[in-house]
Amino acid sequence: MRFQTALQLIYPPRCLNCGGLVESDGGLCGACWRETPLIGGTVCDLCGTPLPGDGDGLHCDACLRVERPWDRGRAALLYDGVARRLVLGLKHGDRVDLAAPAAGWMARSLRGVVPEGALVAPVPLHRWRLAKRRYNQSALLARALARELGLTCVPDLLVRRLRTPSLDGLGAEARFATLQAAITPNPRRAAQIAGRVIVLVDDVMTSGATLSAATQACRDAGAAGVIVGVLARVAKDA
């Protein structure tokens, strides 16, 4: 206890976003917290987008237009403001320290949605992109989320066998076409998928093309169900 107190005096906890002083590690200061678009209340049951009114099992306009192959989905944040900066820091800024608190926010959105005994798996990166980035941010989130929910994480459950170009700037149709058959079950792990509910984890959902490809891979291997959990949802995109 004395050591921890001394350590906090030397390295006091800092806000995850602005670096200001906070009471505990892994938190946001009051100003950044107020600017973080956390999702709560009534949401789309397929992607987690906030919806007006009350009710369960509702779908947003985007999920009514585009068929979602998964069963249910949740998002912790809207991809805007502070949330966008945090996601980009995790994805491109080597901010691996963000994974644990982010997974805590995700777990809050998924409790009551994910059944006991489900397997947690990240959306995979192609090996060349993984070598360039050095880590898969979705795998970091998946491991931390599994700990939060008391579930097992299988980081290599799926593989990205095709080296697809960046999806940035592409429309929904182009994204879906680019990712067709790009993700498959890992041959060494396929038996673990059969008959199990899989929780697919990604950092951001935009069109849903990546999650659709990953879901189809799980369906092909006999998954009993698929639930998606993302850190942030781009709500304005179909």
Image: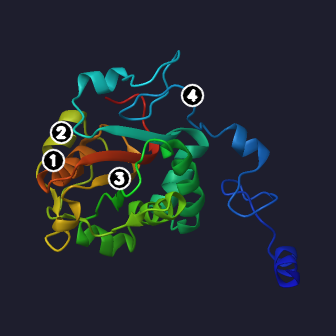
Instruction: Locate residue 25 relative to residue 184 in the image: left or right.
Output: right
Colour scheme of this structure image?
A: rainbow
| Residue 224, x across and y down, in percent | 22, 49
Q: Residue at x 17, y 62 (%)?
A: 185
Q: Are marks 2 and 1 in contact (CB under 8 Å)?
A: yes
CA gap between label 3 and label 1 equals 23 Å
Q: Are marks 4 and 2 in contact (CB under 8 Å)?
A: no
Name the secondary structure under disc 1: helix
Q: Residue at x 72, y 64 (%)?
A: 25
In the displayed structure, would residue 5 be above or below residue 238? below
Q: How many marks?
A: 4
Determine the residue located farthest toward the bottom in the rendered image. 3
Q: Earlier in the sequence, mark 3 or mark 4?
A: 4
CA gap between label 4 and label 2 equals 32 Å
User: Which amino acid does the dot numbered 4 rest on?
Assistant: Gly
Q: Earlier in the sequence, mark 3 or mark 1?
A: 1
Instruction: Locate residue 146 relative to residue 85 in the image: left or right.
Output: left
104, 124: nearer the viewer: 104
Q: Quadrant of residue 31?
A: top right
User: Which amino acid does the dot numbered 1 rest on?
Assistant: Thr
The residue that mark 2 highlights is 174
Q: Earlier in the sequence, mark 1 or mark 4?
A: 4
CA gap between label 1 and label 4 equals 34 Å
